Amino acid sequence: MRFEKYIRPQNFEEALQILKSDQNSVILGGTTFLRLSDRKYSTGIDLSDLGLDFIKEVNDQIEIGAYTSLRKIETDPIINKNFGNLLPKSIENLIGIQFRNNATIGGAIFGRLGFTEIITALLVLDCELEFEENGKVDFNEFISNWNIKRDILKKIIIKKKQGKSSYKMMRNSSADFPILSVAVSNFDTIKIAVGTRPSIAKLSEKASQLINSDNNKINEAVNLITDEFKFGDDLRAGKEYRKNIAPILVKRALQEVLI
Ligand SMILES: Cc1cc2nc3c(=O)[nH]c(=O)nc-3n(C[C@H](O)[C@H](O)[C@H](O)COP(=O)(O)OP(=O)(O)OC[C@H]3O[C@@H](n4cnc5c(N)ncnc54)[C@H](O)[C@@H]3O)c2cc1C
């Protein structure tokens, strides 16, 4: 990644104005992903002065600033107290601590990569994103529709809920990319998300509906997973392999949240 100009805006209006008026400008997160490409941008926009590095409890919700590092989320007591180990588990295998100190949650979400595990985990929480221009947007809506291309992600807002959650993944070796990711929560209702198929994570409709109608129907619900989701091949795993392990991971996660 190269850019001709580096800018550190002092307010959101200025940052958005540059982003919208110059289609070849780019928001810089931790740049862990951006720097892998040799694309040349006109302007790199650094939001470090805009106070986006925070995790706080606000009434019945937790707010995470977009510039918060994945490592901070992994180790934060507020996150651990409220959502158990769901979010830390979805982060802890990502390369190494130095990398996770650098990568931001805003970059992880906005990058919308199929193998980004925290996207799978956030889908089973009650989660909204707050953008400078588009305001509040449901997390599932943002991930499913990809309709916001140029805006500033300011924070992630997660409703506090009582209940259980579980995160499961499969990777060939520690610190490699995952080959499948599964998250299940049991708060007001049971939610199941399957990601890294290798495409981006998605919420289950049919299996979730069945298990919510009868908590004893774990096997029947799990059998719906392979019909409901599309699986594919990549360098790390084949479609058939993913199809075989997805129901197993979903079953293990469901058993944990239903105990
Ligand atoms: C080598 C490598 C291995 C990886 N392995 C894994 C893995 O095993 N598991 C996993 O879950 N993930 C993995 N990832 C994905 C990783 O989680 C994300 O790429 C990373 O977190 C991106 O964060 P960043 O802050 O560096 O984003 P950047 O690279 O800075 O930005 C990514 C994108 O987000 C945009 N952006 C950043 N911040 C904002 C904002 N506030 N508002 C709007 N747009 C914004 C940027 O413009 C860019 O388009 C891997 C990535 C790499 C590069």
Image (cartoon, helix red, strand yellow):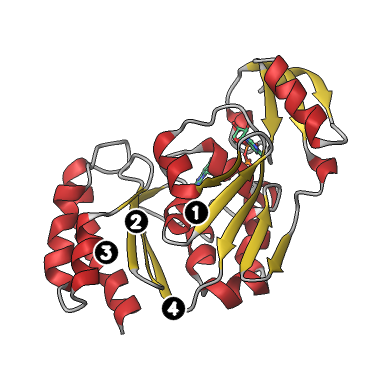
Could you tell me if the residues under marks 1 and 2 are in contact, i.e. CB atoms within 8 Å? no
Residue type at numbered disc 1: Ile
| Distance CA(mark 3)–CA(mark 2) | 9 Å
Could you tell me if the residues under marks 2 and 4 are in contact, i.e. CB atoms within 8 Å? no
Please report the residue visible at 11 percent of the width from the left and 67 percent of the height from the top.
220
Label 4 beta carbon within 8 A of ligand 1: no
Relative image position of residue 175 (x, y in whole percent): 49, 53
Residue under circle 2?
Answer: 193
Assign a secondary structure to mark 3.
helix
Relative image position of residue 234 (x, y in whole percent): 30, 36
- Name which of mark 1 and mark 2 comes first in the sequence: 1
23 sits left or right of 108 in the view: right
Residue under circle 1?
Answer: 118
Q: Which one is in front, 161 or 81?
A: 161
Residue under circle 4?
Answer: 163
Q: Dot 3: few (<14), some (14–19), or many (≥20) neighbours within 10 Å?
A: many
